[in-house]
Image (cartoon, rainbow, N blue to C red):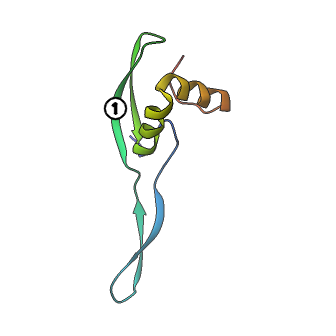
């Protein structure tokens, strides 16, 4: 499975690892992804999503159903049918 958040779309970034002698080596910064199971009471369904911790904070703030509706209105494909 790819290391991409299903809701926010966060993915790996490139950057430099800088040693003590200031030698730069290219490295990857991976997103902090968590596999989480959510219950959506509005549609009476359980959904398993691979989400970043940033998206988890947004879900805590707005609620999952409201966040999914917002993403669907923006045209983001979340893979969840409402």
Across and down, in percent, residue 2 comes to: 42, 43
Q: Residue furthest bottom?
A: 21
Write the residue at 46% across / 68% down.
15
Q: Which of 64 and 52 is in front in this view?
A: 64
Q: Which residue is drawn at 37% across and 44% down?
A: 33
Position of the N terminus by quadrant: top left
- Residue 41 location (% of width, % of height): 43, 13
The residue positioned 40% from the left and 55% from the top of the image is 30
Q: In which quarter of the image is the C terminus?
A: top right
Judging depth in this view, the residue of 66 and 10 nearest the camera is 66
In this orientation, which residue lies closer to the viewer: 26 or 53? 53
The residue most toward the front is 61
Q: Name the residue under label 1.
A: 36
Image quarter of residue 48: top left
Q: Quadrant of residue 28?
A: bottom left
- Left or right of 34, for residue 80: right
Residue furthest out toward the right: 74
Measuring from the top left, give residue 56's x and y in whole percent: 42, 37
Percent across and percent down for residue 8 are 52, 41
In this rendering, the answer to whether 44 lies above or below 7 is above
Residue at the location (45% across, 44% down)?
54
Give the class, few, some or many, for how many residues have Cα within 10 Å of label 1's Cα (few <14, many ≥20): few
Label 1, secondary structure: give it: strand
Q: Is residue 11 above or below residue 41?
A: below
The mark tally for this picture is 1
């Amino acid at each position: 499975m790819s290391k991409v958040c299903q809701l926010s779309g966060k993915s790996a970034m490139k950057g430099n690892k800088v040693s003590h002698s200031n030698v730069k080596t290219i490295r990857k910064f991976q997103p902090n992804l968590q596999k989480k199971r959510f219950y959506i009471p509005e549609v009476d369904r359980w959904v398993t999503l691979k989400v970043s911790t940033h998206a988890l904070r947004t879900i805590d703030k707005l609620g999952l159903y409201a966040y999914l509706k917002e993403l669907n209105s923006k045209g983001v494909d979340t893979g969840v049918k409402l």
